[in-house]
Amino acid sequence: MLSTEKLDTHHKALTLNLNASAFGSFAEIGAGQEVSHWFFVVGGASATVAKTVSAYDKEVSDDLYGSGSRYVSRQRVEAMLDKEWAQLLAQLSDTRGSHTRFFSFVDTVSARNFAGTNDPHGWVGLRFQLQPAGPPNEVLLHINMRDPSNVLQQEAIGILGVNLIYTAFYELQTEESFLAGLAEDVVKERIEIDYVDLRGPVFEGWDRRTLLAHLVSGGFAEAVFFPSRGPTVPPTEALYKKALVLAPGSFGHGDPSHSQVHMRLLASAIQDLQKELGDTKVSPAGFFCLTAAPLTPNETVPEVPDLLRRINALLVAGGDVLLFRQGELYNMKALVNRYTQAPVRFAVGLSLMIQAFETIYGNLEGRLLEALARLLAQNVRIYVYPMSSAELRERLKGFSVSGWEWSETNGMVSATQLRHAPPLGHLFAYLLASNFLVPMQIPATLKAEVFS
């Protein structure tokens, strides 16, 4: 009977070593052999470790796993899994297959380099059987490493790898138990998991989008990416070196008509950025941005099913979605700046812009001024699209905002028609005059839909 007692990394590795039915190989590139190391230092490794290898040299790695892919990529980790699994079965299935649950653990990691100039991240994979001679199951992870030194990052990879193997054999009851097992002692503070892919019969019935949303709501990732078309990828692959338009919002309606309006507003903002960029070959990418944090201090944390309802409505409409752990615009900007130094534009309505000005920002010493400095420090502007006066009043209900006045034209309010008494009014006017806040012009074909 499996104990419910939480085990540390030492005892997880020892438990696996004492379980004579689990036997496998380890191939680790870029951060030492920290996962297999655990199984050797706790004792009894001969019952678990069939082989361990570190194909650190690029020519050796190409010879083993093929050339043509980046060394820290999904393609490389899948090639490693395929080669190690095929070799393991070819060598041992005849003699051990009837009573052994085989596994292959692989990782390819760019840990912090000597100069500290790289982006520490990696891919981790595990293929395993739950019964002897049973079908294989597979877990792929993309990770970002947060420790400040190479030594600490290696240590964290070792803990994560042991967690993954132990969880695969002992804690696959639910998505929540799976993530909790992965996270123990290392994730959140030391390693971020921003992508998970699962394959095999043991994962039938698990919803991939739900698992991705849990990565954010559970604090395992700062953001995850939901594509409307094509395969899911980590945020780095969706954002890398791209000029971006980010459209944050609650998107609570969830019906097709509202989703189509949001799509057209985003397309209009992308066109505006394209005009800014001029005659370049760079095509901006646009993303809807949701947050797993409450929108106001009085709101409860959104439940994952509600987040997925809103996300799915945007995906059906053809929009790509980023789900962020934190809701502040400067935190969203900090996340995307990991992956791109190209221009970033936020496309927001008047109500969201006002709410941003009125937020307390109690976690920042400089409050609003520090929040704006963080947000606008690096090639960032905010496109502000107009709203009807009636909708603006409705959207501001329930928020602690005061002192804002506006005029309107044919029932519509633009950013240039907003006013606030000094000193906040002076700051708002400065941001408009300096082109940090850019009033958007809604195409005539959209006006009837947006303001009806």
Image (cartoon, rainbow, N blue to C red):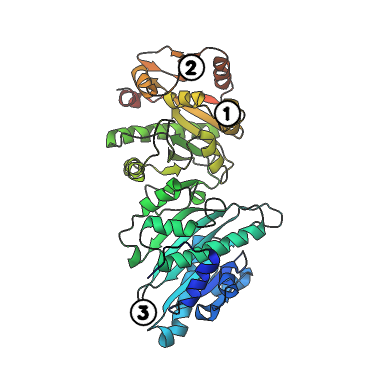
Is 32 drawn above or below residue 441 in the view shown?
below
**Sequence-wise first label, 1 or 2:** 1
Mark 1 to mark 3 CA distance (whole Å): 59 Å
Q: x%, y% of residue 123? A: 52, 60
Residue 71 shows in the view: no
Residue 416: numbered disc? 2
User: Horizontal placement of 203 versus 341: left or right?
Assistant: left
Mark 1 to mark 2 CA distance (whole Å): 19 Å
Which amino acid type is marked by label 1?
Answer: Leu
Q: Kindly state the secondary structure of the residue where label 2 is placed.
A: helix
Q: Name the residue at the bottom extreme.
A: 95
Among the 4 quarters of the image, the one containing residue 157? bottom right
Q: Residue at x 59, y 32 (%)?
A: 364
Q: Kindly state the secondary structure of the residue where label 3 is placed.
A: loop
Which amino acid type is marked by label 2?
Answer: Thr
User: Horizontal placement of 101 versus 74: left or right?
Assistant: left
Q: x%, y% of residue 197? A: 42, 59
Q: Residue at x 46, y 14 (%)?
A: 417
Residue nearer the viewer, 277 or 55? 55
Residue contact between numbered discs 1 and 2, judged by CB atoms under 8 Å? no
Residue at the spot of label 1: 372
Q: x%, y% of residue 388? A: 36, 19
Q: Residue at x 62, y 58 (%)?
A: 153
**Sequence-wise first label, 3 or 2:** 3
Residue 332: numbered disc? none
Q: x%, y% of residue 348? A: 45, 29
Residue at the spot of label 3: 133
- Of badges 1 and 2, nearer the viewer stands 1
Q: Kindly state the secondary structure of the residue where label 1 is placed.
A: helix
